[in-house]
Amino acid sequence: MNTFYEAVAIPALAAIVYTIIDITKTAMGGTEKFNRFIPLISCLLGAVCGVIAFYCVPGVMDTENLLVAIVLGASSGLSATGTNQ
């Protein structure tokens, strides 16, 4: 059962970041200034989600190192940006 959670963790983080960015983009009206910073915001938001997942649900990230959880979260945030764009 734990293997299922490990396989779903990264796409779930990407989906969460994608949803937050899409809601924020709609609320901001899609201004050019905001659109320019979407990849940076997604990367930072994904890193924060990775840290939250590392501490709140320890078995999901499949890592014992906080730095790896941050990198996995940031990469999932950037993949959400690629999906969005």
Image (tube, rainbow, N blue to C red):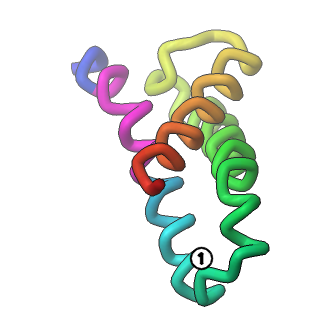
The residue that appears at 73% across and 20% down in the rendered structure is 66
From the top left corner, tell me how far across and down residue 49 is, in percent. 62, 45
Residue 75, located in which quarter of the rendered image?
top right
The residue that label 1 is drawn on is 24
Of 28 and 11, which appears nearest the observer? Answer: 28
Q: Is residue 61 left or right of residue 11?
A: right
Range of residues picked out in magenta:
5-15
From the top left corner, tell me how far across and down residue 20 is, in percent. 53, 66
Q: Is residue 22 above or below residue 68?
A: below
Q: Is residue 40 above or below residue 18?
A: above
Q: Is residue 51 left or right of residue 24?
A: right
Q: Is residue 56 above or below residue 42?
A: above
The residue that appears at 67% across and 58% down in the rendered structure is 38
Residue that sits furthest to the top in the current view: 64
Query: Which secondary structure type mostly characterizes the magenta part of the structure?
Result: helix
Examine the structure image and report whether residue 12 is included in the region drawn in magenta: yes
The residue that appears at 40% across and 32% down in the rendered structure is 9
Element type at marker 1?
A: helix
Q: Give the quadrant of the N terminus.
A: top left
The residue that appears at 75% across and 18% down in the rendered structure is 67
Q: Amino acid at mark 1?
A: Thr
Q: Is residue 8 left or right of residue 75?
A: left
